[in-house]
Image (tube, grey):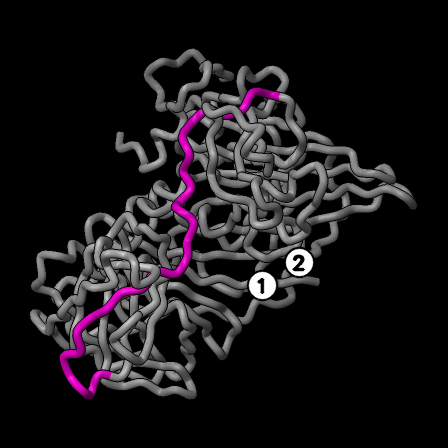
């Protein structure tokens, strides 16, 4: 059986513990490592502890993780949402739980449930759930303070970004703009060939891509008509005239360039993230932006310097309020068509229903907004509450990753049952993809979690409300390092994957 990109996450140097309800050694097994992300002072952190990122809030603090020892459960749910088995966190050694697939009910779910009693008598249940068919090894977060040992591992921070500079030789007087890319999200540029800013640290540890364009609009800041390009060695970068790179000038090339045309319907509105992505030396670069009103793109298919080309389109569908992202692998393609999205309707009048296709179950009635036949997978996040006294309520947040389903089931909490729950929010991500199943599900999980927000949400001296209030931001979700996230991203670049997203708040 193929293991996912993230299967190695459970191996770091940690005393291995387990929890499981079966001794069937022939059945597939999966491990869930439960941690608490936290922002702490780097100077007080043991060198063996993992570091995921720098804190955005406090200088000198980093995001690390501690082994979860309590305040959570692992639940096995039946297909109708009822609980089949409960394992309490205090009985799980080192936060490491082993799932034996034969123990999980058919079409059922495995759930990480964080539980808490909130001031005023409210009781909270926060769930991260994965349908049986999509189970895999994972490292997961809970938000409540833990006293366990730190999770051991390396420092996975990327070198802090800054602004380096690079010079290129002007090949043509018609060149109007020079774009620099140090990565997909590290893009800068300038209208002249000298001192082009690069969104990178200095010294840099990888090449920078420069692409040059003949057309530049100083009002919209759009640039197009790519004419030359080059991957430039990091030794050519500099910060000031005393650096060696200051005296180096690189010559761009027009070799291997091929035209690519693209089109879409009038209802598609692209955002600024849309562009052609090129993979060079195992790193993704932003090759060229894609705009609604510019149909001609230019790639260098035949160069050996790029191992993978992909078209990434992101934006909104104006007639039904859904947003979208789309990866299209480009292999000598000369035309890219974004006209054929699966049919979806406006997400409104969503309710909690007790008249579901599954007997004796609550489900989310999506009011015919989409057909599950058009998609492969989905994430549904919803928030429920139910008053139990004049001063106390049940509160439940649930994020469920499953095969596509028009009636996502409400999963039972270990703390309480529902009689008449109220729905306050629902978020839906619908995915159609030819990528490996485990990779596309875990990539979807990474796009719905912000580990820096979560680490700061758990900080003792500050609560970052964004972690709980932002859309598409799971409180209990998948933890990945920057390198693992990049691997999942590149798995999507090699695929044809479309995700449609919408949210409804009452």
The quarter of the picture where the C terminus appears is: bottom right
Q: x, y percentage for residue 201?
A: 37, 53
Residue 67 locus on image (x, y percent): 55, 24
Camera sees residue 399: no
How far apart are the alpha carbons under marks 1 and 2?
A: 8 Å
Magenta residue span = 148-175
The picture quadrant where one finds residue 194 is bottom left
Q: Is residue 457 above or below residue 71?
A: below
Count of marks, rendered view = 2
Q: In the rendered structure, which disc, 1 or 2, sits on the residue that comes first in sequence?
A: 2
Judged by its main secondary structure, the magenta piece is loop
Q: Quadrant of residue 302?
A: bottom left
What's the mark number on residue 351?
2
Mark 1 lies on a secondary structure that is: loop
The label number, if any, that marks residue 367 in the structure image = 1
User: Residue 448: x, y in percent?
Assistant: 50, 51
Q: In the image, is residue 475 above or below residue 259?
A: above
277 left or right, relative to 217:
left
Q: Are marks 1 and 2 in contact (CB under 8 Å)?
A: yes
The local crowd at label 1, few if under 14, some if 14 to 19, many if 20 or more residues have their Cα within 10 Å, is: some
Decide: is 223 above or below 126. Answer: below
Q: Depth check: give the residue in front, 325 or 150.
A: 150
Residue 144 screen position, x and y as percent: 67, 33
Q: Residue at x 28, y 50 (%)?
A: 490
């Amino acid at each position: 059986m193929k293991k996912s990109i993230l299967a190695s996450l459970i191996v770091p140097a940690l005393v291995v513990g387990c929890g499981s309800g079966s001794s069937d050694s022939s059945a597939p097994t999966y491990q869930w490592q439960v941690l608490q992300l936290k922002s702490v002072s780097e100077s007080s952190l043991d060198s063996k502890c993992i570091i995921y990122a720098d804190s955005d809030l406090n200088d000198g603090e980093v995001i690390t993780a501690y082994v979860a020892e309590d305040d959570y459960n692992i639940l096995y749910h039946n297909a109708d949402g009822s609980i089949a088995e409960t394992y309490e966190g205090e009985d799980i050694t080192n936060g490491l739980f082993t799932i034996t697939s034969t123990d999980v009910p058919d079409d059922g779910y495995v759930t990480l449930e964080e539980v808490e009693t909130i001031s005023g008598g409210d009781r909270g249940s926060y769930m991260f759930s994965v349908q049986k068919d999509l189970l895999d090894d994972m490292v997961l977060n809970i938000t409540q303070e833990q006293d366990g040992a730190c999770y051991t591992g390396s420092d996975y921070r990327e070198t802090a970004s800054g602004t380096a500079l690079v010079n290129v030789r002007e090949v043509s007087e018609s060149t109007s703009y020079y774009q620099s890319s140090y990565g997909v999200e590290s893009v800068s540029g300038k209208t002249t060939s000298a001192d082009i800013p690069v969104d990178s640290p200095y010294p840099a540890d990888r090449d920078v891509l420069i692409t040059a364009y003949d057309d530049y609009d100083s009002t919209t800041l759009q640039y197009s008509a790519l004419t030359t390009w080059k991957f430039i060695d990091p030794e050519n970068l500099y910060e000031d005239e005393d650096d060696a790179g200051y005296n180096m000038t690189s010559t761009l090339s027009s070799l291997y360039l091929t035209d690519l045309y693209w089109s879409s319907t009038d209802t598609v509105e692209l955002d600024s993230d849309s562009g052609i992505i090129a993979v060079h030396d195992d790193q993704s670069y932003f090759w060229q932006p894609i705009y609604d009103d510019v149909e001609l793109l230019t790639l260098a298919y035949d160069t050996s310097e790029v191992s993978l080309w992909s078209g990434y389109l992101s934006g909104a569908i104006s007639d039904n309020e859904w947003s979208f992202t789309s990866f299209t692998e480009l292999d000598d393609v000369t035309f890219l068509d974004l006209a054929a999205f699966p049919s979806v309707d406006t997400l409104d009048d969503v309710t909690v229903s007790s008249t579901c296709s599954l007997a004796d179950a609550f489900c989310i009635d999506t009011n015919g907004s989409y057909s599950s036949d058009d998609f492969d997978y989905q994430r549904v996040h919803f928030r429920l509450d139910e008053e139990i006294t004049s001063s106390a309520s049940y509160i439940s947040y649930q994020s469920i990753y499953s095969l596509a389903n028009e009636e996502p089931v409400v999963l039972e909490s270990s703390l309480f049952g529902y009689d008449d729950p109220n729905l306050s929010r629902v978020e839906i991500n619908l995915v159609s993809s030819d990528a490996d199943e485990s990779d596309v599900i875990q990539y979807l999980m990474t796009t719905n979690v912000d580990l820096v927000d979560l680490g700061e949400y758990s900080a003792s001296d500050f609560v970052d409300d964004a972690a709980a209030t932002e859309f598409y931001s799971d409180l209990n979700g998948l933890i990945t390092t920057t390198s693992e996230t990049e691997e999942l991203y590149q798995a999507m670049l090699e695929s044809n994957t479309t995700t449609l997203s919408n949210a409804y708040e009452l």
